């Protein structure tokens, strides 16, 4: 099922094409997907062990052992050689006396101290600079805060002043009747339109005014 | 206290009835510690559609606008109070907002496209994004990028 499937051409198609092409077949390649289990027919099949030639095997073993022995010998020879050369030469290590060691240590310590001093100086300068910068920033922020407070205070004062001036027109219980009478007597209308000349026409003149006025008159 | 705007539609009534309804409405606000800033009559006219309220069908109504200051938590109470009033067809309370300042830019918009600021910026952007193009005045007598 999962091997090459040879599908014959549809019979209806076959009848249409010529006899010379009748033997054309569509070949479709299929492979069993990776996750498919072992086929039932192959489940208990024990594969036959490959038979090996004893002589050939012995010969291969002999060559293999032979090769390993020779490589090991060469390696040991080279290692001995290197070890002997290292013992007699002083190419990779310097023989120092205790006095020299102390002097070297002294020199390293002095160098290190000098470096530390220069870094400390740099750090001091940098920190001072940063501190000054921070100081300036804080001062600027304080000034900004003072300015903003002043602006806010002025805005609040302005709002209070405005409210105080408006408070005279507030409608309270004692002048409620007057306000209602005034409102009923003076209807306001926010509708307006603009004609092509830029003239603003207030009121809802475009609507059916007769009807509205009739209603108003009825009240 | 924030400023609110109460927009009410009263049912079609006689003048004394309207006065009493308005007074009732205003006193509801005043008795709850509110301040009325303005009371406006927007006229009596036909409703945009027929409205059924409190078992009655209304086709005409009187429009009123009340600007008032009140505590925020009282708005729900007001809504409920005005909703129960049989003379009020519709009522809604809005928070008033300061009118936004809009600069008139009509004279700029009416300019020919080439003089409009946004068009000029758009053209600059297009020029910046344009792909490099072969210049015909380079002096070569053949086109070097022919495939």
Image (tube, coloured by chain):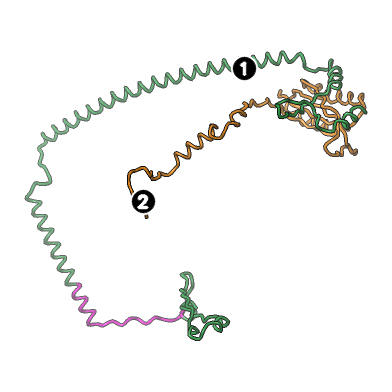
Chain colours: A green, B orange
Residue B39, by quadrant, is top right
Q: Report whether B88 appears left or right of A28.
A: right
Give the number of the mark in front: 1 or 2.
2
Q: Position of residue A98 (x, y in %)?
A: 11, 36
Q: Which mark is residue B145?
A: 2
Q: Name, please, the residue furthest toward the bottom.
A: A19
Give the SS element for disc 2. loop
**Magenta extent:** A42-64
**Marks 1 and 2: CB-CB under 8 Å?**
no
Q: Could you say which is closer to the camera, residue B73 or residue A183?
A: A183
- What number of labels is visible? 2
For mark 1, name the chain: A
Q: Position of residue A67 (x, y in %)?
A: 17, 70
Residue A116, by quadrant, is top left
Looking at the image, residue A196 lies above or below residue A167: below
> Mark 1: few, some, or many residues within 10 Å (few <14, many ≥20)?
few
- Residue for badge 1: A155
> Mark 2: few, some, or many residues within 10 Å (few <14, many ≥20)?
few
Looking at the image, residue A113 lies above or below residue B57: above
Q: Report whether A34 appears left or right of A214.
A: left
**Disc 1/disc 2 C-alpha distance (Å):** 68 Å
Residue B10 in sight here: no
Q: Report whether A102 appears left or right of A117.
A: left
Q: Could you say which is closer to the camera, residue A164 or residue A135?
A: A164
Q: Could you say which is closer to the camera, residue A125 or residue A49?
A: A125
Q: Name, please, the residue furthest toward the front.
A: B141
Looking at the image, residue A33 lies above or below residue B133: below
For mark 2, name the chain: B
Q: Per the image, is A61 magenta?
A: yes
Q: Report whether B14 appears left or right of B27.
A: right
Q: Could you say which is closer to the camera, residue A78 or residue B8?
A: B8
Give the SS element for disc 1. helix
């Amino acid at each position: 099922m999962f091997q090459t499937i040879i599908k014959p051409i549809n019979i209806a198609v076959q009848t249409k094409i010529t006899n010379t092409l009748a033997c054309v077949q569509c070949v479709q390649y299929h492979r069993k997907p990776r996750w498919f289990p072992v086929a039932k027919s192959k489940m208990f099949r024990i594969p036959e062990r490959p038979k090996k030639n004893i002589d050939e095997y012995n010969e291969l073993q002999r060559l293999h052992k032979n090769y390993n022995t020779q490589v090991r010998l060469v390696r040991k020879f080279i290692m001995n050689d290197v070890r002997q050369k290292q013992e007699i030469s002083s190419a990779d290590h310097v023989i120092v006396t205790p006095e020299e060691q102390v002097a070297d240590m002294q020199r390293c310590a002095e160098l290190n101290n000098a470096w530390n001093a220069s870094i400390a100086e740099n750090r001091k300068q940098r920190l001072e600079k940063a501190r000054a910068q921070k100081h300036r920033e804080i001062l600027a922020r304080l000034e900004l805060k003072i300015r903003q407070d002043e602006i806010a205070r002025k805005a609040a004062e302005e709002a209070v002043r405005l409210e105080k001036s408006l408070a005279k027109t507030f409608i309270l219980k004692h002048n409620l009747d007057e306000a209602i009478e005034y409102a009923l007597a003076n209807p306001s209308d926010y509708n307006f339109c603009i004609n092509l000349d830029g003239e603003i026409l207030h009121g809802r003149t475009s609507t059916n005014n007769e009807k509205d006025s009739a209603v108003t008159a009825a009240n | 206290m924030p400023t609110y705007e109460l927009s009410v539609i009263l049912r079609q009534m006689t003048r004394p009835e309207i006065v009493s309804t308005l007074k009732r409405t205003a006193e509801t606000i005043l008795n709850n510690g509110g301040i009325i800033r303005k009371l406006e009559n927007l006229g009596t006219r036909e409703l945009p559609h027929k409205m059924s309220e409190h078992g009655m069908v209304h086709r005409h109504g009187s429009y009123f606008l009340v600007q008032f200051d009140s505590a925020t938590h009282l708005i729900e109470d007001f809504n409920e109070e005005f909703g129960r009033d049989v003379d009020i067809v519709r009522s809604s309370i809005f928070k008033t907002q300061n009118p936004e300042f809009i600069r008139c830019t009509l004279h700029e918009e009416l300019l020919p496209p080439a003089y409009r600021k946004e068009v000029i910026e758009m053209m600059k952007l297009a020029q910046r994004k344009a792909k490099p193009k072969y210049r015909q005045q380079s002096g070569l007598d053949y086109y070097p990028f022919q495939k």
